[in-house]
Image (cartoon, rainbow, N blue to C red):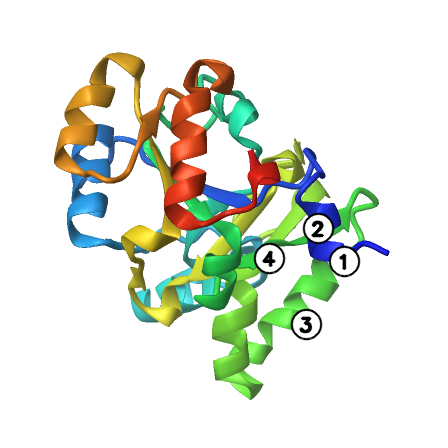
Amino acid sequence: MRGIQDILCFRSDISPFLIHLTRGNEIGTAVENLTSILEYHFLISLGNPISDARFAVSLRNTTHTDKVNLFSAVSFSETPLNEIHCLLEISSREVNLEPYGVVFLKDNLKRKGVSPVIYINNERGDKDSVVRALATLRNSHPDAARQLLPLISVFGRRLRPVGGTYLDRPVDFTWEREWRYAAASGLFNFEVADVFLGLCPHEQISNFERQFAPISFIDPQRNVKWYAKKLVRARQRLGLKYSVV
């Protein structure tokens, strides 16, 4: 009989990695942000509320600190390596990710407190009261709220915001297979041993690899078969089973 971990190593639909992609923002360009992440070995939420639980409260009456602690997080994706390009160049998106980032070992990030998003089905438009009930935890159980509320994401019909304008448009980001690290948990610190690969356009690989050895880099816009030898070396560096790539 096989152990479940041995079986999962052969499941191509279940990635052993979590991806964090960077983009240009008020701090810097995607290149600058990736460089900073790899130099200082931490990720931090910018404080923007991303949890759908934010629609269950009046943000006008919520302090900045509570907005960050209750509704902000660092985001990752469980998208398999060869499908990362599907996260890029998507029209009409508020957040446009770029082909720069870090591929982390999922098991390591689990131990650091990274959790899968809690996707709530609102196809019937009947979950406003459910999410509002969850949001009451901020008063009754504030510590639990800071752990739970940042993970909430709705698919189907949008929630009706408290004290805001309702946009009656469908929403569904389940395909992102998102994981989050709640902002209230502080800095997300990592070690080189948590990193499987770096991501950047092909023409910039040599530069990044000089700066951040022993981490290898690949271009997420190319088929990973281009980088088969690098994947093997990364696997060997971290002592991973052969079947994870």
Q: Which mark is residue 3?
A: 1
Classify residue 100 as left or right of residue 179: left
Of the two numbered discs 2 and 3 on the same chain, state the one appearing first in sequence.
2
User: Mark 2 and mark 3: span between their CA atoms?
Assistant: 40 Å
Q: Quadrant of residue 63?
A: bottom left
Residue 68 x, y percent position in the rendering: 36, 63
Which residue is under mark 2? 6
The quadrant of the image that shows the N terminus is: bottom right
Nearer mark to the viewer, of 4 and 3: 4
In the depicted structure, whether residue 179 falls above or below residue 133: above
Q: Element under label 1?
A: loop
Label at residue 152: 4
Which mark identifies residue 133?
A: 3
Q: Earlier in the sequence, mark 4 or mark 3?
A: 3
How far apart, in angstroms, are the residues tagged by discs 4 and 3?
13 Å
Q: Amino acid at mark 2?
A: Asp
Circle 2: is it few (<14), some (14-19), or many (20+) Cα within 10 Å? few
- Residue 209, located in which quarter of the rendered image? top left
